[in-house]
């Protein structure tokens, strides 16, 4: 190894000169000299470093971590800029040794080393285009979690948050999950002081996981979807999602950001996600956002606000806007929900039964187009209820009998509801049992032979459907 020998000889020759060199004494009257800052030189990559990199990398491939440690340590301490594998392999080596030892002092040393490695990696490889500084900060946050547990939660959270802010939807899935885990642990220690922090961290991580799970080109899309369910559950059970607590945090934020569309939309989405859509703060955010740039979500929020105030006509008008806007974005499941909600208000509050059927039929068609049966049942029940509530004929002797025919048509819809959507079977059976009691009796049908001469009957008026005589 000629290069190594030359380096050793050169270093040996330099030692006596360095030992004999003395600094001149400074004159008493001489003004103090401020030394210029000296930049730390890049470590020299020697032939020995190259050989050791190959040695520890091969041992790591074979999971021989104890054998890998010696050559890895030599490289890490003498030429830490030699290769990125010093840090990717080093993380595996340190983790394996940490798990293998029971010595508290050795565990502490290895824990410090794991975090230190991330700092050193940032120094020498922080400009790497694929794994830049913000990515490495995520690894540092994970190291704090893995090696220190709950002892350094604040440090872990700071690194994880910075990483996610920098990497966005390209963040490592585990970094996103651990950000929420760590933030939740900090919240449990201080529920009053860390609620807003948990909400913010959850929102950031959840949005990134949603983006990843929706990306068909992302090989981790399925994992991201499962982890999003996990962080959603963590947030739901945390208590930070309490609507009154959200109101305390965001009431002032909405008023301070009435012209900040991005902030208003984020607040509205958060409220919708945790089902706090009856909140005045949610309404205010939706209304302000809707004025700046209407979206289906802002329109739906305004519809809820109008309904809460008792203005159901306005609520339906807002749902009409929401339907159109959601169609533009091809959010068809939301379209079906908005159509159903409009149907419900038309039936239950406005008593506009033909309009209610129109919206319910539209929702059925939307769901059918997506191949979804669930959700159709509730629409058929709305239609059946509209039929049952209708009076199509005059209130004379004949009309009172004919008005009972609407119950045949209504029960048809309840039967259809449970056939297509088993989730509403219990409710449908209850309505069938209730309204079948009001069918025209045999005696009443006998009194009107011209009306009930066959096996079917045409229910007229706005209903306009054939039904079986029962």
Image (spheres, rainbow, N blue to C red):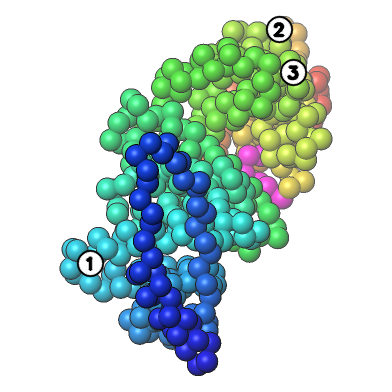
| Badge nearest the viewer, 2 or 3 | 3
Mark seen at residue 395: 2
For the view shown, which residue lies furthest in the bottom direction?
A: 1
Nearer the observer, 17 or 78: 17
Residue 269 within the magenta-colored segment of the rendering:
no
- In the picture, the disc for residue 292 is 3
Q: Residue at x 59, y 45 (%)?
A: 166
Query: Residue 277: percent from the left, percent from the top?
Result: 54, 23
Q: Nearer the viewer, residue 174 or 145?
A: 145
Over which residues does the magenta segment extend?
371-376
Q: CA distance from mark 3 to mark 1?
A: 59 Å
Q: Residues within 10 Å of mark 2 (few under 14, many from 20)?
A: few
Residue located 66% across and 51% down the image:
214
Q: Earlier in the sequence, mark 2 or mark 3?
A: 3
Q: Nearer the viewer, mark 2 or mark 1?
A: 1
Q: Residue at x 66, y 32 (%)?
A: 337
């Amino acid at each position: 190894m000629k290069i190594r020998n030359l380096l050793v000889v050169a270093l040996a020759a330099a030692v006596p000169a360095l030992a004999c060199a003395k600094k001149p004494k400074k004159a008493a009257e001489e003004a103090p000299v401020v030394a210029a800052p000296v930049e730390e030189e890049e470590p020299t990559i020697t032939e020995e470093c190259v050989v050791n990199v190959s040695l520890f990398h091969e041992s790591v491939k074979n999971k021989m971590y104890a054998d890998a440690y010696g050559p890895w340590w030599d490289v890490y301490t003498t030429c830490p800029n030699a290769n990125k594998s010093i840090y990717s392999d080093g993380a595996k080596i340190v983790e394996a040794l940490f798990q293998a030892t029971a010595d508290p002092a050795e565990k502490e040393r290895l824990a410090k080393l794991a975090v230190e490695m991330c700092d050193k990696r940032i120094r020498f490889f922080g400009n790497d285009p694929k794994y830049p500084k913000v990515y490495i900060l995520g690894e540092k946050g994970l190291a704090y979690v893995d090696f220190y547990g709950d002892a350094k939660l604040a440090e872990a959270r700071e690194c994880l948050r910075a990483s996610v802010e920098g990497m966005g939807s390209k963040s490592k899935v585990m970094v996103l999950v651990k950000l929420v885990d760590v933030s939740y642990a900090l919240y449990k220690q201080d529920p009053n002081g860390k609620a807003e922090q948990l909400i913010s961290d959850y929102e950031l991580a959840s949005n990134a996981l949603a983006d990843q799970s929706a990306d068909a080109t992302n090989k981790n899309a399925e994992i991201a979807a499962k982890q999003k369910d996990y962080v959603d559950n963590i947030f739901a059970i945390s208590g930070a999602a309490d609507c009154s607590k959200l109101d305390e945090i965001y009431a002032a934020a909405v008023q301070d950001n009435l012209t900040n569309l991005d902030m208003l939309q984020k607040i509205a989405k958060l409220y919708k996600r945790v089902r706090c859509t009856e909140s005045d703060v949610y309404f205010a955010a939706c209304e302000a956002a809707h004025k700046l740039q209407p979206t289906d979500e802002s329109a739906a929020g305004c519809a809820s606000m109008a309904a809460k105030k008792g203005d159901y006509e306005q609520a339906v008008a807002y749902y009409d806007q929401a339907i159109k806007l959601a169609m533009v974005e091809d959010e068809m499941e939301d379209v079906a929900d908005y159509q159903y909600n409009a149907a419900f208000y038309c039936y239950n509050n406005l008593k506009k039964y033909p309009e209610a059927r129109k919206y319910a039929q539209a929702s059925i068609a939307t769901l059918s187009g997506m191949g979804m049966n669930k959700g159709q049942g509730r629409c058929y029940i709305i239609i059946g209820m509209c039929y049952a509530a209708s009076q199509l004929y005059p209130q004379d002797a004949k009309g009172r009998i004919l008005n009972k025919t609407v119950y045949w048509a209504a029960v048809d819809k309840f039967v259809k509801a449970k056939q297509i959507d088993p989730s509403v079977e219990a409710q449908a059976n209850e309505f069938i049992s209730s309204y079948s009691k009001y069918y025209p009796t045999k005696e009443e049908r006998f009194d009107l032979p011209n009306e009930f001469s066959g096996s079917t009957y045409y229910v007229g008026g706005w209903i306009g459907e054939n039904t079986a005589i029962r």
